[in-house]
Image: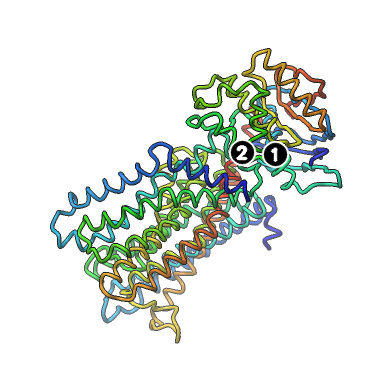
Amino acid sequence: MITGLHLENLAIRRGERLLFAGLCLDLGASEALALTGANGAGKTSLLRAIAGLIAPHEGCVRFAGAKGDLEPEDARSSGIHLLGHQDGLKSAGTAWDELLFQVRWTGGSEASARAACRLLDLERLLGLEVRKLSAGQRRRLALARLVASPRALWLLDEPMAPLDSERRHLFGHLMGEHLAAGGMIIAAVHDPLPIPVRRLDLVFS
Amino acid sequence: MFQALANPQRFMAFSRWAAPLLAVIAAGLLSWGLWLSFSAPEDYQQGATVRLMFIHVPAAYMAMFCYACLGAASLMGLVFRHVLADAAARACAPLGAGFTALALITGMLWGRPMWGTWWVWDARVTSVLVLFLFYIGYMALQAAIDDETRATRASGILALVGLINLPIVKFSVDWWNTLHQPASVFRKGGPSLPPEFLWPLGVMALAYMALFGALWLVRIRAEVWRKRAQSLALQAAG
Amino acid sequence: MSGLWILFRRELGQTWGRGGGPVLALTFFACVATLLPLAVGASPARLGSVAPGAAWLALALASLLSLERLFERDFEDGTLDLLALGPAPLEAVALAKGLAQWLANGAPLALLAPVVAVALGAGLSLVPMIFISALIGGLGLSFTGGIGAALSLGSRRGGVLIAVIVLPLFAPPVIFGAGVIDAYASGLDWRPALGFLSAYSLAALALGPLAMAAACRNALS
């Protein structure tokens, strides 16, 4: 399990443009970080770099475990949830089938998927095709994956944008529980998160 | 040498005089080769048309040689993520396609008097055609992806796939059709061509090689300049 | 391992069930085969002599059809991100996808191939050989084609591009596949051709996932 994240002198380049450079950050267990910054400042790129999808231009991403550093591949294959604008839910599949696949692929079980659905009040939607869900419902379905398969580091890109205030409150509660269990959260946000967080403002370098 | 030239500044300084020098060598060799070609005696079977061989055969060699260069540059680009290797790969493909097209066209011109037809579906012609199509596919892939780094890496992977696959294509096409005359220069027991043909062929092959070297360097330089202009424009735009 | 099995079953279901599944490829196969007599004439002598080769050509074209969906949808809707962060490396993901593609598209096409060839005038004795060569060759076509599909991710004009990239690479399986049937039909030794075809397919099975995974990583970056 990941118990710490260390970014060392990280620089990310997209095409010809250097988004940021020299970024150092340490995140420990039970800590949450809100990424803010203008559009195009590199919030999404930073999340994808931590997830290993983008190779950093300079510097490195290290994951700490209980007994020293983890292999990045191991940490990423079993310790990271990345939830971006694209949720990977196929619009023609039923909500339950899509969720169940995502949960099992990321290491959860059918029972935990059921429990997550109860928690997020999704039970009545499960038989519907994903394309019939509203944006808010669909996002809740995507969030159920985070709850259902336990992974320590949540990388969230605008997780709450489509949610109404009641669900935001609920999601805040779920994030609090994740942190209390020793998890970590990095979320790119425009609105403040409903939990105590540190803030990292990305500005153009 | 690779280590030294991997530095873009040093490469630019080196290629600045190397490219014109190679061009001069190419021009010299080409003139000499053409003179030799035209002063070579006529073939007792083919007559004067045998002179097409001196243009055709080196082009066919270059078609394959360019692919080897493309594959090597792509490998270096993918493994070391080096800008110059990427630029070299990008610069190489159109040259390779050009030599391949030249080989095909001169082959057709030669085939007409030799075999009485412009086109024969024999093994060597077909595999060169496949090579040509592959060059086109490589360039099409590169052109179709907007992000330049990504385009170069995708086409680099394709070039490596081709490096493994094209010999298989060659083998399969040979297997498909073994009717062609056997290879006559590089075969066991020494070349079977008379020396008065071997000389112009060798000189022309060297001339093509020098020409390719000069054009490649010029194109790599152009790639480097284009990149610089792009990043300057981006900087200017803020 | 269980994660991969889940993925494989899902991919099989997706390829089989989505957007008409193999029915589309099968129909395309039949359409190409129908156009052939209209193009070259219906004389049995002429058709019969080209039937096995034409069946193989149509097979190669039909197996191109569904390639565009192999990675493109997953790339666009974010599934590929999820797959990249799963229990198995992307190479294994590509292997599962390629195998599912083969079973859900290649195998039905291999079943139809003898029917098409016989309808065009090939002898009934060729039926088993056509099926076997199409099935084995289909494996190679799926994995070679998958490379093209992964490489063209994020490009404009995916479908046409895949065809342009992949068709030159289809030369060996088409040659060996049609060669098997040719040799068998003319009473020659067909085993070398079948051996080459199998070797090609196994090589594609082994190396294809590496290239596909590299191409996917490149597209995601």
Q: Secondary structure at mark 1?
A: loop
Position of the C terminus of chain B by quadrant: top right
Amino acid type of the residue that numbered disc 1 sits on in the rendered structure: Ala
**Most foreground residue, C128 or A195:** C128
**Most foreground residue, B45 or C125:** C125
x and y, in percent, of residue C69 in the image: 46, 41
Q: Secondary structure at mark 2?
A: helix
How many callouts does the rendering have? 2
Residue drawn 39% across and 71% down?
B35
Q: Which residue is mark 2?
A: C81
Q: Would residue B62 be visible to someone looking at this image?
A: no
- Circles 2 and 1: CB atoms closer than 8 Å: yes
**Residue at the front extreme of this rendering:** A111
x and y, in percent, of residue C62 in the image: 35, 49
Q: Is residue C181 above or below residue B83?
A: below
Q: Is residue A11 left or right of residue C170?
A: right
x and y, in percent, of residue A160 in the image: 67, 20
